[in-house]
Image (cartoon, rainbow, N blue to C red):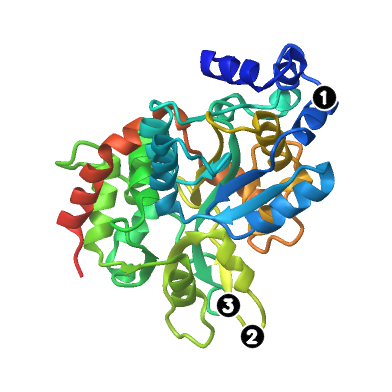
Amino acid sequence: MGAGVLAMALAAGPAWAQNAWDAEGFDLDALVAAAQAEPGITVYDSTGKIVEIAEAFAATYGVEATGVKVSTGAQIDQVMREGQAGNVVGDVVVVQDVPPAMAQLVPMGLLESWTPPDLVDVIPEGMRDPVIIVSSPNVWTYNTEVYESCPVSNIWELTEPEWNRKLAMQDPLGKPTYTDWFNQMEMHFDEAVASAYEAHYGAPLDTDEESATKAWVKALAANSPLLTDSDSAAGDSVGARGQAEPFMGLMATAKFRDNAPDGLALGLCTGLDPFSGWMYPGIGMISTQTDSPNAARLFIRYLLTEEGIAPQSADGKLSSNTEVPAHPEDLSGVADYLDEMMPYSTATAMDDFDTRQDWQDFWRMNYTR
């Protein structure tokens, strides 16, 4: 336990309240009892489903909780302003923009992470600090009404003339998670991108760029993808029925909710070299200034249970708790292809933050309308 957490715990009340969340003396029943004695909490998340999750939590534990939707772009600024003013409203924040949280909010002492001691063994080591609540898959998609299977098998194909102006995706200049994806790919999987090139073209990549990832991003940008302001727009471009030559696309699995006989016809591309998609985490963070440290921790633990995360897992989001099964209502089927998803490393999130502008400039210089 960090010094800030210890000081806050001691100020909050008797030692048993602190030990309710301490790894050495963790006691779920004591944590619940301590939480019930505290003021209600407010939870920020970028999904409106946090409202129903907070209501279910309150009903389960008898602890008042209010869920508030705060857009991804506004989360960091709101937490920073509240912390600097000493007027904290958000006791728990499910941060969907990880790099600035790790680069700014944590060093400023505004937020901290806590992993439930009784769940440590079912959460992979790389997902514990900060604790990842869910990972959101962003996947390559195709139109199942036109194609029997994914029309490409290698991401380098998407840089070729056949897919010129025929790929729909969110604009990296407006969606920082995309530049984070580029940076993670370059830092951790550049050899896989180079190998995919050689597997497709039969010769090693020869490029003036400093990495295979930059070469691929440059070629993708130059192939004039349709840039959208939302996954919804990208999904409609790919999955709308009645098209003769539909777009390929990249989007969050939540868009698969619109699949229906009279809705969209989205299919998950599988078997792509080197990845069929990529994962982006939502981390659970607690305000260091909360008046309800036990309730905040109990809520984090609730989010890591099947019941707590069910409203989000229905959209294909995946819990870091390996014992939580895929939701039966997820229409994407991504849970069966997790080994094809590029993982996200929070250990290098600060590098993602530091290079965002560089990657945006790189995209801007190479994008062809």
Numbered circle sitting on residue 264: 3
Q: At x 44% / y 76%, what residue is drawn?
A: 237
- Quadrant in which residue 263 is drawn: bottom right
- Quadrant in which residue 355 is drawn: top left
Q: Is residue 121 above or below residue 292?
A: above
Instruction: Kindly report the distance in space between the C-alpha atoms of the residues bearing marks 3 and 1.
Output: 48 Å
Tell us which disc is closer to us: 3 or 1. Answer: 1
Numbered circle sitting on residue 216: none
For the N terminus, which image quadrant? Answer: top right
Q: Is residue 34 left or right of residue 253?
A: right
Instruction: Kindly report the distance in space between the C-alpha atoms of the residues bearing marks 3 and 2.
Output: 7 Å
Q: Amino acid at mark 2?
A: Asp
Q: At x 54% / y 84%, what residue is drawn?
A: 241
Q: Is residue 307 above or below residue 301?
A: below
Q: Secondary structure at mark 2?
A: loop
- Quadrant in which residue 81 is drawn: top left
Instruction: Kindly report the distance in space between the C-alpha atoms of the residues bearing marks 1 and 2.
Output: 51 Å
Q: Is residue 151 left or right of residue 206?
A: right
Q: Is residue 361 left or right of residue 179?
A: left
Q: Is residue 28 left or right of residue 309?
A: right
Q: Amino acid at mark 3?
A: Leu
Q: At x 28% / y 43%, what residue is drawn?
A: 356
Of 368 and 355, nearer the camera is 355
Numbered circle sitting on residue 30: 1
The mark that comes first in sequence, 1 or 2, is 1
Q: Position of residue 345 (x, y in %)?
A: 47, 32
The mark that comes first in sequence, 3 or 1, is 1
Q: Residues within 10 Å of mark 3 (few under 14, many from 20)?
A: many
Q: Which residue is mark 2?
A: 262
